[in-house]
Image (tube, grey):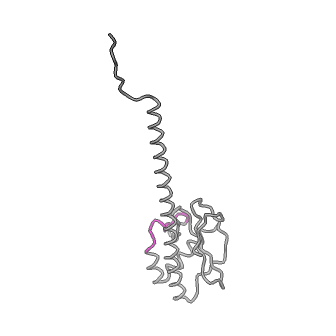
């Protein structure tokens, strides 16, 4: 008499296929989430540029000029950003616009306790501010996701 045994369970190949499909789906979800995060940060920089452009227009209307910053060396972006913040804080209309910028983007990371904060992009790099008398409008530059100025991922208000 032969007994027939029923096999319950999964083979190793079936388990490996299921694990592979789960890993593929997880990879797809992570890459989509990463791209959404990146796009949100890019939109954040663009909206910050719009606010700072408005604050700079308020400054120009009040002072009849833009704050001068002829130095274009990105190595001094911290100083340029602090200078921009100080100048915009001195004008009531620009000051109100600065209050609309996310507080996490305005920090005092490099100065003393008494010094003014700098303006940072969503990746944690200070914004660079440049303006030479004679130009139409100041230039604001974000180093972008790689946090290095002068590369292809830099973002600017122009």
Q: Nearer the viewer, residue 16 or 148?
A: 16
Q: Quadrant of the N terminus?
A: top left
Q: Residue furthest front?
A: 1
- On the image, which quarter does residue 8 sit in? top left
Q: Is residue 106 above or below residue 34?
A: below
Q: Residue furthest top?
A: 1
In the image, what residue occupies the spot 60% across and 79% down?
A: 138
Q: x and y percent of residue 39 in the render?
A: 50, 63
In the image, what residue occupies the spot 59% across and 65% down?
A: 143
In the image, what residue occupies the spot 57% across and 60% down?
A: 145
Q: x and y percent of residue 35 in the render?
A: 50, 58
Q: x and y percent of residue 110 in the render?
A: 55, 64
Label tally: 0
Specify whether residue 81 is painted magenta: no
- 98 left or right of 133? left
Q: Nearer the viewer, residue 24 or 59?
A: 24
- On the image, which quarter does residue 75 sit in? bottom right
What residue range appears in magenta?
A: 100-110
In the image, what residue occupies the spot 34% across and 19% down?
A: 5
Q: Is residue 2 above or below residue 71?
A: above
- 1 left or right of 11? left
- 153 left or right of 26? right
Q: Quadrant of the C terminus?
A: bottom right
């Amino acid at each position: 008499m032969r007994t027939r045994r029923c096999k319950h369970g999964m083979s190793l190949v079936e388990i490996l296929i299921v694990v592979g499909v789960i890993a593929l789906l997880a990879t797809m979800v992570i890459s989509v989430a990463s791209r959404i995060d990146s796009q949100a940060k890019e939109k954040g920089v663009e909206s910050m540029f719009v606010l700072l452009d408005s604050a700079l227009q308020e400054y120009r209307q009040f002072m009849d000029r833009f704050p001068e910053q002829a130095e274009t060396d990105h190595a001094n972006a911290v100083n340029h950003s602090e200078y921009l913040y100080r100048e915009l804080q001195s004008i009531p209309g620009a000051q109100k616009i600065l209050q609309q910028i996310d507080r996490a983007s305005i920090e005092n990371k490099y100065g003393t306790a008494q010094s003014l904060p700098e303006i940072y992009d969503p990746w944690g790099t200070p914004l660079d501010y440049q303006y030479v008398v004679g130009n139409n409008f100041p230039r604001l530059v974000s180093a972008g996701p790689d946090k290095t100025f002068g590369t292809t991922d830099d973002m600017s208000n122009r």
